[in-house]
């Protein structure tokens, strides 16, 4: 297997669990998935589509990660855990991007066109997050674990929730109490349920008041 120095450096810099470079080369499924993708992409660009797809299949069998050989991925790409990561054919990813396990960069069209996301530089996508469609995610964006993003996100934002919404922009909190790590997220659904309970209680109070007035 060919090992790509920039991606190896990303593993060494971003994964404190790695013992040394040999450990990364032999046992880090994310790094192995990225290296196999790089080779399959070279084959894809050379018109060797069958070989590219065969290597893609092998990578999926070995690492649990499915990166289409047609995807375009920049330097120092890091997948922390490969299992469940899916990256579609027309995805474009910039430099210094980090994905955690279970991330999907998926399409929403059956047409042969640009149908997958474009990610800028220095983006972090938390575990289990889903980014769908031909949308652009700007530089230095953080997407929280479990979020579903279906709209464009400007640079320097943090996005959480289902559907994903911006909770900070340029370091300034937009609607939430905490600055978020990808694994420390507010429960957007729970917040909405709490607000609904308050509104229901207000309606109940109003109904009781109207009933008393009518009886009087």
Image (cartoon, rainbow, N blue to C red):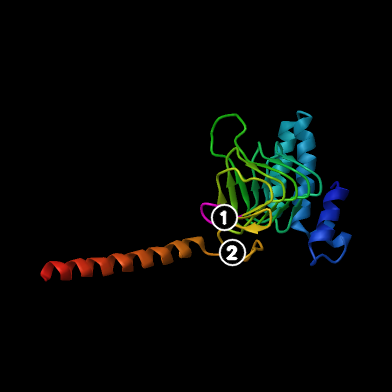
Please tell me how crowded label 2 is: few (under 14), some (14-19), or many (20+) other residues with Cα within 10 Å. some
Q: Is residue 58 magenta?
A: no
Quadrant of the image containing the C terminus: bottom left
> Real-space Cα distance between discs 1 and 2?
10 Å
As helix, strand or loop, the secondary structure at mark 2 comes to loop
Q: Position of residue 111 (x, y in %)?
A: 55, 30
Q: Which mark is residue 185?
A: 2
Residue in view at x 77 percent, y 31 percent: 45
Residue in view at x 79 percent, y 60 percent: 14
Residue in view at x 74 percent, y 37 percent: 52
Total labels drawn:
2
Is 82 on the left-hand or right-hand side of 5?
left
Q: Which mark is residue 147?
A: 1
111 in relation to 121, above or below: above
- Can residue 12 be seen here? The reply is yes
Residue in view at x 81 percent, y 49 percent: 76
Is 69 on the left-hand or right-hand side of 18?
left
Verify CB contact (< 8 Å) between mark 1 and mark 2: yes
Q: Which mark is residue 174?
A: none
Q: Position of residue 18 (x, y in %)?
A: 82, 65
State the extent of the magenta-drawn residues as a range.
159-166
- Can residue 3 be seen here? The reply is no
Q: Position of residue 107 (x, y in %)?
A: 58, 40
Q: Quadrant of residue 179?
A: bottom right
Say which of 121 and 108 sits in front. Answer: 121
Q: Position of residue 137 (x, y in %)?
A: 65, 44
Please tell me how crowded label 1 is: few (under 14), some (14-19), or many (20+) other residues with Cα within 10 Å. many
Say which of 103 and 192 sits in front. Answer: 192
Looking at the image, which residue sits at the far left? 215
């Amino acid at each position: 297997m060919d090992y790509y120095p920039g991606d190896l450096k990303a593993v060494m810099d971003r994964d404190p669990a790695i013992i040394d470079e040999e450990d990364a080369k032999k046992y880090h499924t994310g790094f192995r998935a990225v290296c196999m993708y790089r080779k399959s992409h070279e084959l894809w660009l050379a018109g060797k589509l069958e070989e590219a797809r065969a290597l893609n299949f092998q990578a999926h069998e070995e690492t649990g990660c499915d990166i289409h050989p047609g995807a375009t991925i920049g330097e120092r790409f890091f997948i922390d855990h490969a299992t469940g990561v899916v990256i579609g054919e027309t995805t474009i990813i910039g430099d210094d991007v980090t994905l955690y396990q279970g991330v999907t960069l998926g399409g929403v069209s059956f047409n042969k066109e640009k149908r997958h996301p474009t990610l800028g530089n220095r983006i972090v996508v938390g575990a289990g997050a889903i980014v769908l469609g031909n949308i652009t995610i700007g530089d230095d964006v953080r997407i929280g674990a479990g979020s579903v993003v279906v709209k464009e996100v400007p640079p320097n934002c943090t996005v959480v929730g289902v559907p994903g919404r911006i909770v900070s922009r340029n370091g300034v909190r937009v609607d939430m109490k905490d600055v978020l790590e990808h694994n420390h997220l507010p429960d957007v659904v729970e917040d909405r349920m709490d607000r609904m309970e308050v509104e229901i209680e207000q309606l109940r109070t109003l109904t009781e008041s109207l009933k008393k007035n009518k009886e009087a």
